[in-house]
Structure formats: C-alpha cells, structure tokens
Amino acid sequence: MIGDIVPAGVAVADSFGDLPDARLFPEEEAGVRSAIDRRRREYATVRHLARQAMKDLGIPAVAVLSGARREPLWPSGVVGSMTHCAGYRAAALSFDAHHASIGIDAEPHAPLPEGLLTKVAHSDEVPHLAQLTAARPEVHWDRLLFSAKEAVYKAWYPLARRWLGFQEARLAFDPASDGFTAELRQIGPVVAGVPLSRMAGRWHVRGGLVVAAVTVSQALGEPGAAARGR
C-alpha cells in the first residue's frame, strides 16, 4: 500500500502481519527487552522490512536503532520511515541525495476515538473536514487527518530536530488526486535552497486501512520539495 503513494526511487517493503522469519540484530534487542510478545513481533517485523528495503537500495543490512524521540536511526546517506498498526507494517527508505526526508504512517480506517479530533485538528481544518465528509462519506477523514499529520511529523523531525505539534501543521486534502498539502506553522531548516514551510504527500484507503506518506525532495520544484511560506 505504501508503495502506491511514494515517488520513484523510494524502496518500500510491507506486510499485512508479522513475519515468522523476522529476527532482531543483537543491538536491537534492548529496545524490546521487557516488551510483550505482540510488541516484540511487530518491532522485529518492521525492522526486517527495513532491511529488505536496504537490500533493494543495494546497501548492507544493518541494525535499526532508535533516537531520543524513538525515531529510527538510518545508515549514513539514507533517509526513511517505518510504521505499524493492526494488520499492517511497512518501511520506506531512500538515499539522501534524492530525498531530504520521508514520513509514512498507517492506521485502521475507523473514526478517531471520541475527543481526539479536537486535539488533532486546527480550527481552520474543521470546515474542510466537514466538506470532505459530505462529498466522500465513505472515508473517515478524521482518521486520515491524524495519519497524515503523523507522516508530516515523521518527515519533519529528522530535519528540524524539534517538536511539531498536531495543530502546527494545517492540512488540505485533494480527493481527486489522493494528495494533501501541509502548511507548517514553524519555519524549518533550509531544503533545496529554501526554508521548509510546506510539505506535500499522498494518501490511500484500502482493506480497512488508511496510509499516508510525505516525501521531501532534495530538488527544488519537484513534488514534495521544500516550498516558501505564503
């Protein structure tokens, strides 16, 4: 699924459940030493998928450790993102010569728990979600908003190294293209020659899942490239 919404040059590996042959590298064991079995299996599976993506890029498989905010730490010259939810795991990687950052997220395609939307949505986004719901009621737009903002944050943090709250990214969805844009309320680092203030992504709904992906290109003017604030 993630492979359908990322650009060429991004290596994706995914599965719709845990893989029985997934194994952790010794360095990764500390991350799940006290975890329950379910958590351990999904942790191992998503790293197994990341190593499949590394193989597709033609680089050696290495351990995927976690940083201070649980972000994955990739080999030098590589950017990427991982996600897992009930029934789906995925990893997406690329070379930093092509993409400055990647963020992916998967969620069950169901309404958000009661009360969560007010924490996720900016007041400017509420009318937009209502319009989308009226036009496409089969899509749980509140859950899609959450997933897309998770993808935005995953692409933002490795570049900016600072927090970006849910309401600091204002999203607009285009149902015709399955795309979205995110206007950032913080000015990010310089990418492709300009301060990062906008991101672009794509989304997909299928089989009880919603997925979102953001890629930040290294080339100004390409889809997902950094854009100047308005």
Image (cartoon, rainbow, N blue to C red):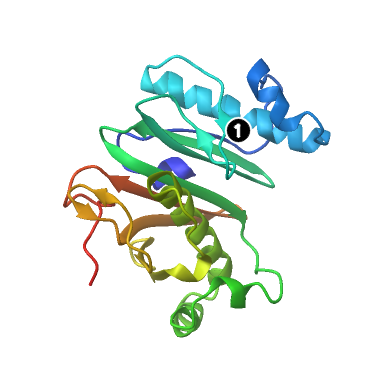
Return the x and y of residue 90 as percentages of the image width and height: 54, 38
Q: Is residue 13 above or below residue 151?
A: above
Residue on which disc 1 sits:
46
Nearer the observer, 142 or 79 = 79
Left or right position of 60 against 25: left
Instruction: Judge from the rendering whether residue 210 lies leftward or rightward of residue 110; answer left or right.
Output: left
At label 1, counting other C-alpha atoms closer than 10 Å, the crowd grade (few under 14, some 14-19, many 20 or more) is many
Residue visible at 44% across and 18% down in the picture: 55
- Identify the secondary structure beneath mark 1: helix
Q: Residue at x 44, y 23 (%)?
A: 54
What percent of the width, then of the height, locates residue 145?
A: 51, 66
Name the one closer to the observer, 158 or 177. 158
Count of numbered circles in the view: 1
Q: Quadrant of residue 197?
A: bottom left
Image vertical order of residue 194 relative to residue 159, above or below: below
Q: Quadrant of the C terminus?
A: bottom left
- Please name the residue shown 49% across and 61% down the image: 149
Instruction: Give coordinates of residue 178: x percent, y percent.
Output: 38, 61
- Residue 175 lies, in percent from the top left, at 39, 68
On screen, residue 87 above or below 139 = above
Q: Amino acid at mark 1?
A: Val
User: In the rendered image of this protein, does residue 127 appear above or below residue 213?
Assistant: below
